[in-house]
């Protein structure tokens, strides 16, 4: 049991100062640190595990031990030389606000329980709608990540398309409901399928539309698919293919879907951020014509995990799908925002504070600079690597994603490419992953961190080329 002594302001300050020292020490070392962890799983299990503690331990000791044991097992995803998956770091203001969020410990479900959190979310939503150029009266929700943003948006879509044929899915479920046609691009993200599973819509009957060499849905093929039948229909489009960064032809997709009376959902986990950059906005031309959008703040806005966003052009459908009422949940009587009406959670972290701090610290021009800078780094990677003999860049580098293939004299390009990826990961200068793109093994580079410098990219290019020569 925590003793009263530990609850005194002095004891608490001393404990939090310790945590600050560990955190700042870690962050200060990041620019020079090996990216991949050094601790093995066995070591981590041995040092962290053991029997269930049967008695208290001094919090200072707990924090000190945790920091020293965990740090060698951390991947330096927060630093500027991590290029795996699509993972952003944490902007200083967002990180500091995240600490405050924990100290304040608000339960941001209802206005009455956490008024400041509710207002901050309201402000973030309005700012982001403007930043992305979405319809002014769109509703929004702050969720854990794009997986849940896709889920929330598709729940609103399910509500709306069934409502138009007189079916109340929230009351009556899906048994006996009119069938819902789901049209998806061949290259949709896996979280779309998972959201459809969660929603009882399943994945076996998806109507899949073919894509081009960059993974973009073919608009003509979508029109043909839409013409095959009528009835409740949802089209899942994408802004930012997880491999190539390519964006579906959104204006054509939205126009065709609108004509057919279908709902268009856009999964823009990172690609939606192109809308915030005047020089990249053309990539998502027409995006405002969709019905719902999903994105992440923990990717390109560089807000700490977990932080996703959903927007919906039809607030009534959004609220009908998510709203939750019970006698003890004291909803606001005015127009205050009760967050639980807009997302699938009940009790929840006040994740708006760090998002607010990120947007407030960058401003509109800072967001555009961040996005543009990452894309410039991606182009630098692509140009430098493509100059080397035996190295191919497989995609058009339109955003922050680069796919690289290493050719093998013996013809086994897949094996050599995978060997280079593994060697780079082991070297530790930077970290990036592998993928398979249209049947070919590829190295996948994603530049999503605010702190990445040109020097980080140059050191990483050198490390990749060293790994490539050693695999010859
Ligand atoms: C296009 C796309 N959609 C959805 C997701 C899932 O996002 P999250 O992991 O934040 O749930 C990702 C993640 O990379 C993505 O790239």
Image: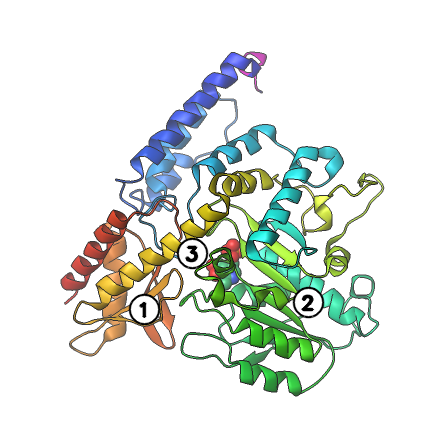
Name the residue at 82% across, 39% down: 328
Q: Earlier in the sequence, mark 1 or mark 3?
A: 3
Instruction: Look at 39% across and 43% down and name the residue there.
Output: 78
Provide residue 445's location: percent of width, then percent of height.
34, 60
Query: In terms of sequence position, does the residue under pointer 3 or pointer 2 come before the other?
Result: 3
| CB at disc 3 and ligand 1 closer than 8 Å | yes
- Left of 135 or right of it: where is 3? left
Is there a contact, CB below 8 Å, between mark 3 and mark 2? no
Other-residue count near label 2 (Cα within 10 Å), few / some / many at <14 / 14–19 / ≥20: few
Residue 121 sits inside the magenta stretch: no
Numbered range of the magenta stretch: 2-6
In space, the residues marked 1 and 3 are separated at their CA atoms by 15 Å
Q: Residue 299's spot in the image, x, y percent? A: 47, 52
Label disc, if present, on residue 86 of the rendered structure: 3
Q: Which mark is residue 33?
A: none
Does residue 5 belong to the magenta stretch? yes
Q: Is label 2's Cβ within 8 Å of ligand 1? A: no
**Looking at the image, residue 50 lies above or below residue 223:** above
Q: CA distance from mark 3 to mark 2?
A: 28 Å
Label 2 – label 1 distance at C-alpha: 34 Å
Is disc 1 placed on a helix, strand or loop? strand
Residue 194, image x and y in percent? 58, 64
Dividing the picture into quadrants, the one containing residue 26 is: top left
Residue 321 appears left or right of 303: right
The N terminus sits in image quarter: top right
Q: Write down the residue under mark 2.
A: 200
Residue 120 sits above or below residue 369 on the image? above
Q: Which residue is mark 1?
A: 442
């Amino acid at each position: 049991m925590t003793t009263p002594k530990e609850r005194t302001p002095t004891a608490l300050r001393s404990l939090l100062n310790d945590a600050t020292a560990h955190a700042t020490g870690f962050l200060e070392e990041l620019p020079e640190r090996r990216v991949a962890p050094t601790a093995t799983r066995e070591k981590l299990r041995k040092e962290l595990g053991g029997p269930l503690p049967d008695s208290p331990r001094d919090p200072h000791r707990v924090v000190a031990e945790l920091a020293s044991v965990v740090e060698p097992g951390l991947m330096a995803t927060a630093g500027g030389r991590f290029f795996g998956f699509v993972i952003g770091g944490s902007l200083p203001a967002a990180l500091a606000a995240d600490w405050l969020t924990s100290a304040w410990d608000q339960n941001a479900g209802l206005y009455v329980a956490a008024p400041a959190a509710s207002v901050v979310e309201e402000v973030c939503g309005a700012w982001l709608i403007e930043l992305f150029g979405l319809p002014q009266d769109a509703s929004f929700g702050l969720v854990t990540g794009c997986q849940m943003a896709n889920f929330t948006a598709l729940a609103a879509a399910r509500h709306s398309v069934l409502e138009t044929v007189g079916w109340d899915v929230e009351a009556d479920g899906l048994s006996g409901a009119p069938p819902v046609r789901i049209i998806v691009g061949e290259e949709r993200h896996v979280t779309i399928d998972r959201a459809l599973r969660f929603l009882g819509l399943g994945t076996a009957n998806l109507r899949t539309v073919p894509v081009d060499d960059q993974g973009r849905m073919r608009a003509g093929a979508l029109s043909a698919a839409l013409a095959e039948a009528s009835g409740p229909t949802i089209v899942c489009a994408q802004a930012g293919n997880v491999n190539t960064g390519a964006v579906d032809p959104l204006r054509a997709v939205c126009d065709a879907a609108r004509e057919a009376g279908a709902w268009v959902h856009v999964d823009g986990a990172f690609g939606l951020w192109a809308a915030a950059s005047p020089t990249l906005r053309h990539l998502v031309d027409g995006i405002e014509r969709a019905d719902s959008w999903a994105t992440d703040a923990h990717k390109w806005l560089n807000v700490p995990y977990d932080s996703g966003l959903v927007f919906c052009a039809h607030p009534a459908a959004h609220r009908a799908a998510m709203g939750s009422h019970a006698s003890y949940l004291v909803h606001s009587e005015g127009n205050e925002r009760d967050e639980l009406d807009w997302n699938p959670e009940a009790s929840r972290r006040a994740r708006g504070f760090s998002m607010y701090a990120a947007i407030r610290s960058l401003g509109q021009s800072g967001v555009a600079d961040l996005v543009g800078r990452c894309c410039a780094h991606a182009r630098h990677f692509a140009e430098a690597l493509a100059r080397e003999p035996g190295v191919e860049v497989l995609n058009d580098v339109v955003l922050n994603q680069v796919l690289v293939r290493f050719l093998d004299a013996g013809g086994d390009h897949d094996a050599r490419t995978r060997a280079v990826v593994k060697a780079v990961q082991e070297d530790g200068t930077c970290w990036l992953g592998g993928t398979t793109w249209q049947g070919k093994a590829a190295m996948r580079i994603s530049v999503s961190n605010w702190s990445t410098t040109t020097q980080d990219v140059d050191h990483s290019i050198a490390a990749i080329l060293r790994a490539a020569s050693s695999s010859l």
